[in-house]
């Protein structure tokens, strides 16, 4: 059953004049060797080793030596991405440190990282959750040959109508004219051959049709692990990528993390909510770049910092603290 933590690992501060929001990226943001700069520092290498031991996967190897095809495997990619975010979080807010931000949000698997930022889940519980999520989704992806493609531009209504005809689904509404669609590979090929007028179709290097009906086989086991998790109410505002709303209950947020594996990611609505909240700065945890890129179109004029290596922590820290 869900419980409540009696203490939070970190303390947070809502900015009255500045609203700095931390965001955590999702699958596809990894690249070969991207953790090399992190393990050059002993504290991050030790932290990554602890995470590796917890999930039973050699993330030290996969984050530094494994090739693109290996880390595309969902069972590896998701723990790897969450681990990278946790390393960046350690750099921003060491044990008992103070994270001066006005809220947090995560894209897809990034919601697990976000749950740690908001002190909903402990790091240990988050890793237990992502281990089950990644394996369950990897197993589901093996049942039918599926994939995902990004569609850039074109009329959204026309695209959604075409997806229905092809038995494809809109998996990510990313804003700025970008929608990620998913389904069987043959149907994705038909879409690429005859796209909506004015659009481009770009195949993505992922191993399945995530956030669609094809992930349903992973849900029951994920419900089981979620039911055993100890969840606290958020220690700072957290927006769900289900519909961009603020979530005040830790148990509700965990339920949303379960259901989102078969539901579309509405990052467009999340960015809309951030704009309404008056966001004045965006910090993307490692492996940064994708969400700050979307923010340039969806949150025009808002300064951003993408944390890719430990060298980026200084700029993020300065943004958090108004320097």
Image (cartoon, helix red, strand yellow):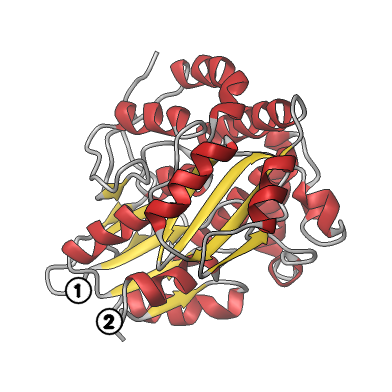
Closer-to-camera residue (223/91): 223
Q: Residue 76, percent across and down?
A: 74, 43
Q: Position of residue 197 (x, y in %)?
A: 51, 65
Closer to us: 26 or 189: 189
- State the separation of the CA atoms marked 2 and 1: 8 Å
Q: Is residue 228 visible?
A: yes
Categorize mark 2 by other alpha carbons within 10 Å: few (<14), some (14-19), many (20+). few
Instruction: Note whether 323 is above or below 237 in the view shown.
Output: below
Against 294, is 220 above or below? above
Q: Are marks 2 and 1 in contact (CB under 8 Å)?
A: yes
Where residue 99 sits: x, y (%)? 34, 62
Residue 290 location, quadrant: bottom right
Asked where in the image residue 303 lies, by quadrant, the reply is bottom left
State the quadrant of the C terminus: bottom left
| Coordinates of residue 96 in the picture (x, y in percent) | 39, 54
Tell me which label, 2 or 1, sits earlier in the chain: 1
Circle on res. 322: 2
The image quadrant that residue 294 belongs to is bottom left
Q: Secondary structure at mark 1?
A: loop
Q: How many marks?
A: 2
Q: Residue at x 65, y 35 (%)?
A: 134
Query: Measured along the vertical axis of the image, is residue 317 above or below residue 8?
Result: below
Numbered badge on residue 18: 1
Q: Secondary structure at mark 2?
A: loop
């Amino acid at each position: 059953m869900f419980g409540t933590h009696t203490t939070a690992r970190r303390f947070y501060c809502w900015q009255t004049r500045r609203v700095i929001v931390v965001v955590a990226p999702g699958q596809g943001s990894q690249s070969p060797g991207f953790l090399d700069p992190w393990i050059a520092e002993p504290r991050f290498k030790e932290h990554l080793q602890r995470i590796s031991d917890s999930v039973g996967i050699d993330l030290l190897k996969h984050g530094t030596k494994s090739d693109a095809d290996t880390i595309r495997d969902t069972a590896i990619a998701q723990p790897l991405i969450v681990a990278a975010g946790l390393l960046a979080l350690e750099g921003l807010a060491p044990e008992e440190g103070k994270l001066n931000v006005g809220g947090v949000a995560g894209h897809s698997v990034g919601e697990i990282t976000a749950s740690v930022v908001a002190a909903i889940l402990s790091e240990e519980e988050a890793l237990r959750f992502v281990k089950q999520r990644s394996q369950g989704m990897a197993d589901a992806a093996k049942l039918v040959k599926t994939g995902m493609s990004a569609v850039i531009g074109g009329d959204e209504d026309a695209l959604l109508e075409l997806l229905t005809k092809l038995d494809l689904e809109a998996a990510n509404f990313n804003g700025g004219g970008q929608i990620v669609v998913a389904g069987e590979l043959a149907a994705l090929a038909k879409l690429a051959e005859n796209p909506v007028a004015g659009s481009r179709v770009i195949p993505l290097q992922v191993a399945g049709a995530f956030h669609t009906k094809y992930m349903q086989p992973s849900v029951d086991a994920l419900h089981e692990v979620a039911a055993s998790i100890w969840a606290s109410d958020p220690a700072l505002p957290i927006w769900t990528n289900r519909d961009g709303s603020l979530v005040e209950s830790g148990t509700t947020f965990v339920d949303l993390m379960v259901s989102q594996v078969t539901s579309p990611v509405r990052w467009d609505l999340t960015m809309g909510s951030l704009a309404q909240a008056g966001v004045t700065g965006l910090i993307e945890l490692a492996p940064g770049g994708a969400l700050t890129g979307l923010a340039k179109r969806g949150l025009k004029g808002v300064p951003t910092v993408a944390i890719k290596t430990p060298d980026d922590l200084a700029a993020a820290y300065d943004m958090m603290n108004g320097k």
